[in-house]
Image: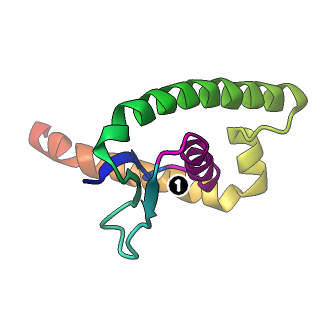
Amino acid sequence: MAKLLLNLRNVGDDESHEVGELLDLNHIPWYRTEPSPWGISNGGIWLRDNEDHPRAKALMATYQAERSQRMRAEREAGLQDGTAQTFSSLFRQRPLYVIAVLLGMLAAAALVLLPFVLLRG
């Protein structure tokens, strides 16, 4: 019976491909389900055999620790050389987008707090 190894919600294509390569290198049969067009399902990487799950989980733990270190090192290098995306660089590149998102956040906070303000007054 198939077992879900990785839910693809917020997983980049590079990471999902690396996980597939990791499973292939370790001769673990797997398959991928794609996200639904309506956003109901996020897709996933599934193991074909339940028996492979403990070994795959151990491989994933090692992979994720290594990836975490690699991504942090890349981020730090980007901050050092000025190529990493920061709030100010995003604001310079897309000011209308940043302002729209901030206004949306402010509107959402206002809607949440509105009942408390009305009950108080």
Helix, strand or loop at mark 1: helix
Eyeballing the image, is 108 above or below 80?
A: below
Amino acid type, residue under disc 1 in the picture: Val
Residue 32's quadrant in the figure? bottom left
State whether the magenta stretch is mostly helix, strand or loop. Answer: helix
Q: Is residue 75 magenta?
A: no
Eyeballing the image, is 43 above or below 87?
A: below
Magenta-tinted stretch: 11-28
The one nearer the camera, 82 or 11, is 11
User: Residue lying farthest bottom?
Assistant: 37
Label 1 Cα crowd, 10 Å radius (few <14 / some 14-19 / many 20+)? few
In the picture provided, is 81 more to the left or to the right than 49? right
Q: Residue 49, position in %: x, y?
A: 33, 48
Q: Residue 86, position in %: x, y?
A: 71, 38
Eyeballing the image, is 71 above or below 101?
A: above
Q: In which quadrant will I find the C terminus?
A: top left
Q: Residue 65, position in %: x, y?
A: 56, 24
Residue at image coords 34%, 46%: 109
Q: Residue 66, position in %: x, y?
A: 63, 26
Residue at image coords 60%, 56%: 13
In the picture provided, is 92 more to the left or to the right than 19? right
The residue wearing badge 1 is 101
The one nearer the camera, 50 or 32, is 50
Residue 5's quadrant in the figure? top left
